[in-house]
Image (spheres, coloured by chain):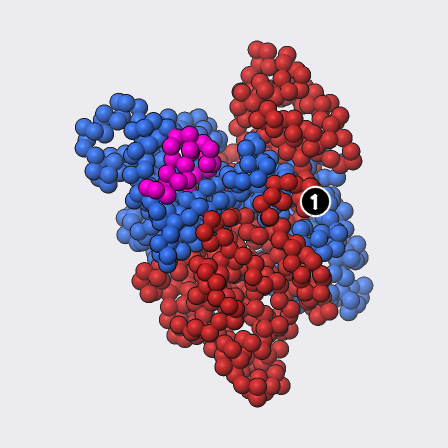
Chain colours: A blue, B red
Amino acid sequence: MKTPGREAASSRPGVVFGPLHGVRVLDLAGRAGDLCGRLLADAGADVIKVEPPDGNSARQRPPFIADTPDPERSLTFLHYNAGKRGITLDYSKPAGRELLLRLVGRADILVEDAGEDSLARCGIGHSALMKASPGLAHVSITQFGLSGPYRNYAANDFICFALGGLMATSGEPGMPPIVAPGELAYAVASGYAALGGLIAYYNCALTGEGQLVDVSIHEAAAFTAGYAVPVYTATGEKPFRQSWKKRLFDLYDVYPTKDGFIRIFIMPKKHWQSLLDWLGRPPELMSEIFNDQKLRWQNSEIIDPFIERLCRGYTKDGIFREAQRRHIAASPLNTPAEFVQSDQARARGFLTTVHHPVAGAYPQTNPVFRFSASPGFVLRRAPTLGEHNTEVFCGELRLSHTELKALQSGGIV
Amino acid sequence: METTRLLPPRRLPLQDSRVLSLTLGAAGPMTANALGYFGAEVVHVESRMRPDGHRGGNDPNAWDKTPFFVKIHRNFQSATINFNTKSGLDLVKQLVQVSDVVIENFSLGVLPRLGLDYPNIRKIRPDIVMAGLRGYGSTGPWASYASWGPNLGAMLGMSYLWNYPDAETPTAEARSQHPDFLSGVCGAFAVMAALIHRRKTGEGQWIDLSQAEVGSMTLAPIFLDTLVNHRESRPRGNRHWGSGLQGVYPCAGEDQWCAISIETEAQWNAFCEALGRPDWARGVTLTMVASSPARQAEIERGVRRWTQSLTKYDVMARLQSCKIPAAAVQDVEDEVKRDPQYRSRNFFVEMEELEMGKVAAERLPILLSKTPGSFRTSTPFFGEHTRVVCQALLGKDDGQFTELQAEKALY
């Protein structure tokens, strides 16, 4: 079940324009930064993915459709590159560099995750890019940012997450700390990269000036770690790893139900009062002090057994519905596929089916933003390798077909 | 556009924009915070009638002493306005008139009841950009459902996957607010996209953001694997997604760890050299190690023997000198006091905060070369700017102000 607008528009992509319609983006990024271009595409920008002739390394990332490793079947690549057009170009060679700079001259935003040294080696360092396009928003997403003693260190999402503070509080005491799923540091870095790109684009509209947006994944990892830094610097308190069974000072535990687990998280007083009604207002819990969140946390060993008994009487879906009926923030502990197949995800048209010439039909997430001025805006599927070479090089850069053929046989395109 | 400003003008991209924040919690304020960082004036409406858990909840004595609140409320102007009075509601409507952006995360149904939903707001200010951030979005059967960040983490499969392979416990996740932090930046991005659209067309709009969808987006390769390949998703702990060798290993000292991630054959060879075990790589590729659990377990035992004799920073320095991705697992004290990279880039910004003295918090994880953004003011006391908002922005005189206070419209 999809929202009607999306259904109608999906057969004719391009009919509805997002708010960034007309904003031109060149996306040179691999997995560390490809969500940035995806977010720009989700808001309607024209994003051209520039890949080396043998394909972006993200095409090698599992999982693959039908478990067949193939550059056109990586679900990771297909997801993070939906909504983009795709060209191939070897810009380490002079002829390729010249074409890239011509594309840069037409672009508003350029996104890369290679870093200054590696781009400068190809002759497309920051100053060369700004010369080609003085108003450019040059978004550089790197592991440690472009300055500082770690700037040349080797890292990835896992390594940055280890440095960022949240890993140290993940996992069971006595066991090794563990990383968050979903490459969270990459995701948050890409979010801020996309925001920074738009700030720079907006500023250029006011002043005519382009600039460099230096995004650090290492900083993004710490930024997403919550409130540990202000709490520590104000009070000296440090968060630590705790067993889920022995959480000491919070009441957002997960509780077993008949067929799975449920998380119940009580914050405001009115939610607590609603929970008390549900529990039948037991005398042990009727003290005024329990209206206070902090005092509830400190007394969780008194409160927890009541909630636990309540939960055991329901299925995880049953208690979720009943809790929500009572305006209590409860949610089942799901697998990722359970949420995307839920009534809610279906009603909002979270997924749509796209057709790919090599990979066949597969589900794709719709744009994550709903803008009222562009209802039903949908994305094209991720490009096959070099799919838009002719469209971009001949149609937009005005190369002849003969010139394109020569570039292709020269290994440039 | 209203030109009165509460702060002296500076050259920042959003310096001519005013954001009205009708939010609490994390994702909503963080959206306003990111816009404020780049120059927008943020008027944050609070009320004793709607206490913010991040400020300290029901206890008024905690409101100016909660370090939590600092991270996402710098640059804010706090005005206490009580929506439950007619005069309070009128004040909010007057604020809408002089604002460019409204951000809200009320429970569904509250704003329509107050006449502050988008159809009504746009009558007051036709080109307004309004963003609603809700757990499950503003449409669909769950639109009114209550949720906090940790609820969404459970709902999305984040909590389930954040665990060890073959774990017996339901989750081993950190206490985190995900996906609040990703939703906050996505909210700010969407508002910027709408402001760009408005600059070109003069048209405002309404943005509906589902935090669940934002968070779920990062797990797409995993649920697509289930939908397409019919494979159940399972927690992977620290295991590498592809054919790499990746793990967290104990170091010298109590509860000290290092993270190592070997992804290429070149790194694999360099790693064996660095550990003085070139024999491991003899005739054995990284791919072969990754595909044989027995061989992997044996190598990991050897790695642990090596790391246990070193500090986590020694491991990091030695392996980084051979270009191998490795790091100390840092806690917050390490981040603030030890990490030379954060320090060199001035990532933690210390300010005098509320009644707490000096408190550090992260700046945004981006540096813009021409318009770097800034914290211009520290976190506001509860209601610190009520008077200046009423008088300088809305033109109320002393008499009117006192009257509004007396009828608890400013409360």
Q: Which residue is drawn at 47% across and 36% down?
A: A115
Q: Which residue is drawn at 73% across and 31% down?
A: B311
- Image position, residue A81 (x, y; %): 40, 40
Is residue A276 in sight in this rendering? no
Where is B66 relative to A123, above or below? Answer: below
Is residue B2 in sight in this rendering? yes
Q: Quadrant of residue A65?
A: top left
Q: Nearer the viewer, residue A110 or A44?
A: A110
Q: Quadrant of residue B202?
A: bottom left
**Chain letter of disc 1 in the image:** B
Q: Mark 1 points at which residue?
A: B337
* Location of the C terminus of chain A (image quadrant): top left
Residue A122: say if magenta: yes
Q: Which residue is drawn at 29% across and 34% down?
A: A99
Describe the element under mark 1 as helix, strand or loop: helix
Residue A231: say if magenta: no
Q: Is residue A226 left or right of residue B393?
A: right
Q: Nearer the viewer, residue B193 or A80?
A: B193
Where is B394 relative to A3, above or below? Answer: below
Kind of residue indicated by mark 1: Lys
Q: Is residue B303 left or right of residue A287?
A: left
Q: In which quarter of the image is residue A104?
A: top left
Q: Residues within 10 Å of mark 1 (few under 14, many from 20)?
A: few
Q: Nearer the viewer, residue A193 or A7?
A: A193
For the record, the magenta segment spans A111-132
- Image position, residue A358 (x, y; %): 34, 31
Q: In this view, does A97 lie to the left or right of A270?
A: left
Q: Residue at x 30, y 33 (%)?
A: A98
- Image position, residue A28 (x, y; %): 40, 37
- Image position, residue B45 (x, y; %): 56, 70
